[in-house]
Image (tube, rainbow, N blue to C red):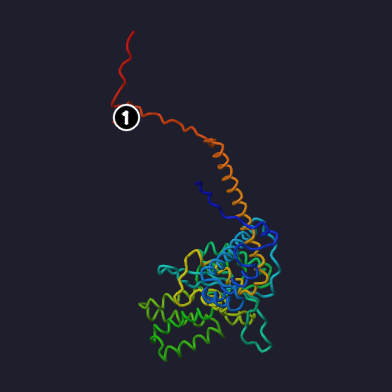
Amino acid sequence: MEFALNVDREFFPLDEELELVPGILTPSGQESLVRLCGWMPFRRAAETIDGLLGIEVNKNICQQYTEKAGAAYEQMQDEEVDELEKTAPPAPQGAEKMQISADGAMVSLLHGVWAEVKTVAIGEVESPGPEGGEVHTKNISYFSRKVSAEKFDRLALVEIHHRGIENARKVAAVMDGAEWEQGFTDHHCPQAVRILDFPHAAEHISALGACLYGENTPETKGWLEERLHKLKHFGPDELLVEFRALQEQYPEKQEISSNLSYLEKRRNQMLYPEFQALGWPIGSGIVESGNKVVMQTRMKGAGMHWADKHVNPILAIRNILCSDRWKEEWPKVEDQLRKQSALNRKKLHQDHAYSAHLLDLQLLDIQEPVIQIDTPKKNKPNPWRNFKLNRALYKPSDPPKN
């Protein structure tokens, strides 16, 4: 009895004509599933979509579909960055006043490893009311990746360009004191007004008070409240004079020296009365809340640990959702998935054609020609080229005399 040959994977010919996406779900079913998985854990999403739409899937299928869609969007954005760098098209028109804020937050990976996810939040600064008050930022969008600072600078171009930061009339970079964040501003918006996040400056001043009066004591709280009021309404100069005097009085206290050095270096970023008069926010709350909204809410649940390769695809889906761009971006994700499916089908055709060719040769009892590549022969070592003390150990015998 002869055995039948194994049957390889195939595809339905109408997939392209019907514009189906790869997988077992309809396009609308896949969209609903990925959207749910972007908001909630995979197991809960599986239960929810079964209850709402009657689509029975398990946790693994939810994860596979979501990560595949996220990876497609990530690839699409990376390709867009390549194109922007090659062609340098004009950026869209930005808003009148815009804020950019970048920050990092930690995510738990497998095997007890922690890694930093970097996020930039971009928004439009609203004008304060006639009575002043707190300045708000609206229409906030996010870009997040778990990559190095240098790679993040490059990849974030896709969102910086999309929001028209280059053509915004005024931009403020409200950041904490991390060096990579200042490098990010240098890379994308060197003309921006640089503002040190006020709560971050307060942390360093609080450290000075704790060094003098102890942590969380009534004396420290009263001292800190008075200094922060001065900083917010009168600027840093008077405080810096006071802190220098403290350094001279307590030269042995390293906490005073280090925090004073940090604040002095960022003196021009703490001109809070001027910034507020110009209608700028003095806090980077949009990115700190972005860390929670984009990454922590979805990826730091109880018992969650992520494989390294799965982090960025989930972040890509979260960026779409939290930036309120689902209707705009999901059709692009579907197109990218169809392109990938078409490439897979093309490769499948090529593999089948090659397999058929080998089968024909086998049936005709013809051996596939083997191309041999001549390799240069290695010369055998000459025994008389073994030198010691600059002379040969062996010499050829004298030629015979005629």
Seen in the image, is 91 located left or right of residue 227? right
To which residue does mark 1 refer?
Answer: 386
Seen in the image, is 311 located left or right of residue 394? right
Write the residue at 50% across / 34% down. Answer: 373
Q: Quadrant of residue 17?
A: bottom right
Q: How many numbered dots are placed on residues in this image?
A: 1
Write the residue at 59% across / 82% down. Answer: 273
Secondary element at tag 1: loop
**Is residue 194 in sight in this rendering?**
no
The x and y percentages for residue 13 are: 66, 56
Seen in the image, is 115 located left or right of residue 232? left
37 shown above or below 153: below
Write the residue at 51% across / 81% down. Answer: 199
Q: Disc 1 marks which amino acid?
A: Asn
At label 1, counting other C-alpha atoms closer than 10 Å, the crowd grade (few under 14, some 14-19, many 20 or more) is few
189 shown above or below 14: below
Q: Quadrant of residue 61?
A: bottom right
The x and y percentages for residue 194 are: 58, 73
38 or 219: which is nearer to us?
38
Q: Quadrant of residue 251?
A: bottom left
**Is residue 114 in sight in this rendering?**
yes
Quadrant placement of the C terminus: top left
The x and y percentages for residue 50 are: 58, 76
